[in-house]
Amino acid sequence: MTLSKSVIACLLLGLLTTACQPQSSDNSQSTPSETTPPASSPTPQPSLDPAGDPSLPPSPQVEASPELTTEPIAMGDSSQTSLDWAGVYQGVVPCASCSGIETTLTLNPDRSYRLTLRYLGESDEEIERSGTFSWNEQGNTITLSNSDNAPSQYLVGENQLIQLDQQGERITGGLADQYILSKMDSSSESSSDSSSRLSQASPLGEEPSTTSKNPLFDTRWQLIELRGEPIEVRSDAQAVPFLLFNTKDNALQGSGGCNQLRGSYQRQAGNRLSFSQVATTQKACADMALESAFLEVLGMVDNYTLSNDQLSLHKAKMAPLMRLQAVEAP
């Protein structure tokens, strides 16, 4: 009996041991599966491409933004900042009731100005305005203060001012090019410099110590030939175009045969001659053909010759565009 109990006890112990072994094996195998990541799922590595992982900080390319600040600086150049605008500007602009408006506008570095207007053909009285001027936001246009009924806005260009209308717009039409004031060379205000330039530009080798010795100046030159065609001399001298070169301020006066004209002339060495800012009155005549042709040719002239009492105006080395005869003023 005792032996049977011992056998039974050993069998039960063997069964218990066998039952416990698979459970221990399952537990030991499950533990690595929970702690060891699968071979197919490697540990993520930091991406070198910021776009591949939104959790990474922004790309350092944002440091290129300072380059964008250089573009507005280049765009900041304007007439106000890049041009030598201070100085004296002169010209003769068109006038509805006179021969022209002789205009002188002085711009000072401290933004003060002085404007002088003289209505040619009406009186010798000058109208003066003075004050300060301001620039527009673009830095290309000035507005005069205290200008009353005088022109108040000008577009600033290189060595010139362009008069604008009351709305600040460019004046258009056939006379648009005549609303320009040219900057005067400061050296031209010196009498000694003027005498030197006249000496270099004296025609026909004459002694030009003074301008009064040059027959070109202060002489009434009446048209006798235009583009090779003779001009009929009429009893009414005002019906024939003429020119008069004033020594003062290089001013040009004359007539197209119907309307009076005003402008400026420039004379340089080598008998070179040109006209600018020529303005006329706006009177209507029965026959405007001669005046129109005369004014057209006047704009083509670039040199001249003098022979006795005749003045010939040329373009380059071509035949004379027109011939004029010295006459006494009526």
Image: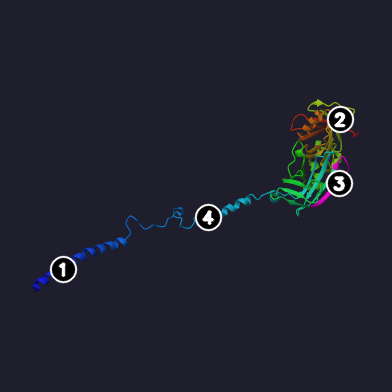
Residue 247, x across and y down, in percent: 84, 41
User: Which secondary structure, mark 2?
Assistant: helix
Where on the picture, by quarter, is residue 9? Answer: bottom left
Magenta stretch: give its range: 119-131
Residue 205, x across and y down, in percent: 81, 37
Q: Which residue is mark 2?
A: 239
Disc 2 to disc 1, how far (Cα)? 152 Å
Q: Which residue is mark 1?
A: 12
Task: Please name the amino acid that badge 2 sits on.
Answer: Ala
Between disc 3 and disc 1, the foreground one is 1
Disc 3 to disc 1, how far (Cα)? 140 Å
Mark 2, other Cα within 10 Å: few <14 / some 14–19 / many ≥20: some
Q: Which residue is mark 4?
A: 62
User: Which secondary structure, mark 1?
Assistant: helix
Mark 3, other Cα within 10 Å: few <14 / some 14–19 / many ≥20: few
58 versus 248 height, above or below: below
Residue 106, x across and y down, in percent: 79, 49
Disc 3 to disc 2, how far (Cα)? 30 Å
**Sequence order check: which comes first, mark 2 or mark 4?**
4
Q: Nearer the viewer, residue 288 or 58?
A: 58
Whether residue 3 is visible: yes
Disc 3 to disc 4, how far (Cα)? 63 Å
**Sequence order check: which comes first, mark 3 or mark 2?**
3
Residue 311, x across and y down, in percent: 82, 32
Quarter occupied by the N terminus:
bottom left
Task: Please name the amino acid that badge 3 sits on.
Answer: Glu
Disc 4 to disc 1, how far (Cα)? 78 Å
